[in-house]
Amino acid sequence: MSIATADKETLGFQAEVKQLLHLMIHSLYSNREIFLRELISNASDACDKLRFESLHNAALLEGGGDFEIRVDYDRQARTITVADNGIGMNRDEVIANLGTIAKSGTREFFASLTGDQQKDAHLIGQFGVGFYSSFIVADKVTVRTRRAGEKPDQGVEWVSDGGGEFTVTMIEKPERGTEITLHLREGQDDLLSAWKLKSIIHKYSDHIVQPIKMRKEEWKDGNEVKLDAWETVNQASALWARPKNEISEDDYKAFYKHVAHDYDDPLAWVHAKVEGKTEYTQLLYIPAHAPFDLWDRHARHGVKLYVRRVFIMDDAEQLMPLYLRFVRGVVDSADLPLNVSREILQESKDIETIRKGCTAKVLGLLADLAESDKEKYAKFWGEFGRVLKEGVGEDFANKEKIAKLLRFASTHNDTSEETVSLADYVARMKDGQEKIYYVTAESFNAAKNSPHLEIFRKKGIEVLLLSDRVDEWVVSHLTEFEGKPLVSVAKGGLDLGKLEDEAEKKEQEKEASEFKDLTEKIAKSLGERVKEVRVTHRLTDSPACLVADEHDLSGNLARILKAAGQKAPISKPILEINPKHPVVLRLRTEQQKFDDWAAVLFDQALLAEGGQLDDPATFVKRINDLMLSMSLSSQ
């Protein structure tokens, strides 16, 4: 809905923006100073973007290549202004950037809000607050901007009071860039002082590469008087280029918040200068929380590429493999050309070296964390574990390093918490155990209660309980760990090797021959539904279970592929029956309702392993008929 008069147009905010503004004003008020950090951060990005675009088109600089950010205040008018001479925006960009939130994950973000101010403040921080944080301190915001390279009469003015609407007007603006003026709310007058604004800049924005300038002031007749001269109030040097011993922990945290547009401190970081054939500096961070678009594999990546401290691009996905897409930070190369493009990056040997180096550094940082700070690593795993698992199949060179970082639930604790490493499992293996056993299922409870575990629980053999969708991908690529094969308890013939004694093996052979007639009869009854029926030694309590043949897809993987709309190769399961179970023993003498019993046995086994019945109504009817006939025969 828009109302236009002359060249002024009134437009409505996207519903999510209205919601965000309301939440921001009420939830983030306790940390109101972040508005200045966010506006300066955006101004810095705008300068970086123009510097990059001007490498290909020098005319965009309009004769002035020195970038700067200016912060000013007017005590009488009760305003604060943040201005930059960066890329600026045209009318369409103003409406898109200041009127809508185009982030993927927006819906999930709003669904996660609780109404509890503390918790919501935290979530809003994760989402990235950006420009809208202005409304924490202002009841009206005016933005005047012009895109670099456009004519002076192509300026745009955007005005809003943070309610439901904003106005857009075309204006004359001789200088390129953006100027944001905040009309302060009541009770915010302490911000109208050079000392206060400088202290906020030092706290949050000291590391910004561009000079942040404020007017010089002097005391005259007991009052502070502003001069026409401007002075730089931040360090204005690339933090990552400074020696590590000059950078405090707070500096690193403040820089992270700028580079990641995050509200929280990072979980860990690594800062290193690499010298050799390829020279570069890396400052890479692990966030404390997953961003809302983590599961969008096409979302922006978090590493900025610089060449000799000149910003080149924002989301340089070539610098980090996909499974480390949560990493944020900066890579500054000394060797790449300044006019490097995305196409050149894909072919560049230097980039390949940098990517390998960055990957190794992040995996090394995670390994240190796993070793030295288990609590922090558990937090990391809870946020990013499922993404890291993708690396097992994507990064062959680092497969072993990633395998050591994986954590799983297992029958050792019998809880859904993923705390067991493969090294932990191997250290606890029983004498004579040669394999790492696992079961995959659609949910933790389905895995924990799988009938395939019965013999393992009886013998006290630990089994990994895998219930993430990505786990099927993991075990298809990770076939062994430290020389021990990973084996599904629901595939192939179960060979417990030295964990079984000779007496047990003889007993199994005897039962297999004793029940040969019955297994053949059940196989004939079930027909095309099964590949084979055989006696089991996996079960202690259940009458039957389904297993996949050694080289067939597991039932769980087949279901995942089907749910994803992909055709899975058709493979029939093997039905294993428990020769000691009363239902199986009954089948040996059953004549009249044999087919019904066999079908129910199969359907129950399918349900127990998380499968879906092709014909639930018939299953229920059969169960009812069998119960009825049993009750009649017992009367």
Image (tube, rainbow, N blue to C red):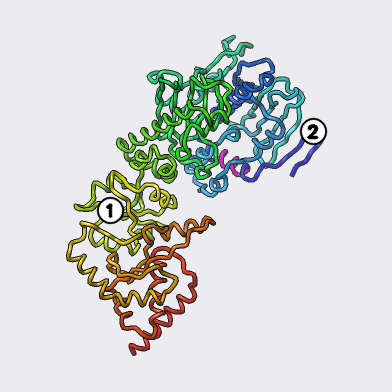
In the image, residue 415 lies at what x, y percent?
33, 54
Marks 1 and 2, how far apart at CA: 70 Å
Task: Decide if residue 316 is on the left or right side of residue 359.
Answer: right
Q: Amino acid at mark 2?
A: Asp
Q: Which residue is farthest top? A: 220
- Principal SS element in the magenta part? helix
Q: Which disc, if any, is residue 7?
A: 2
Residue 382 sits in quarter: top left
Q: Nearer the viewer, residue 464 or 48?
A: 464
Q: Nearer the viewer, residue 96 or 456?
A: 456
In the image, residue 95 lies at what x, y percent?
69, 36
Tell me if residue 19 is in the magenta stretch: yes
Circle 1 Cα neighbour tier, 10 Å, few/some/many (<14 / 14–19 / ≥20): some
Secondary structure state at the residue bearing disc 2: loop
Read off the magenta span: 18-25
Q: Amino acid at mark 1?
A: His
Q: Nearer the viewer, residue 403 or 525?
A: 525
**Whether residue 261 can be seen here:** no
Tell me if residue 432 is in the magenta stretch: no
Q: Residue at x 45, y 31 (%)?
A: 355
Above-or-below relation of 399 to 180: below
Q: Nearer the viewer, residue 371 or 278?
A: 278
Above-or-below relation of 17 to 57: below
Quarter the N terminus occupies:
top right
In the image, residue 319 lies at what x, y percent?
48, 31
Q: Residue at x 35, y 70 (%)?
A: 533
Q: Which disc, if any, is residue 120?
A: none
Label 1 with label 2: CB-CB less than 8 Å: no
Q: Residue at x 43, y 65 (%)?
A: 572
Residue under label 1? 412
Quarter the C terminus occupies:
bottom left
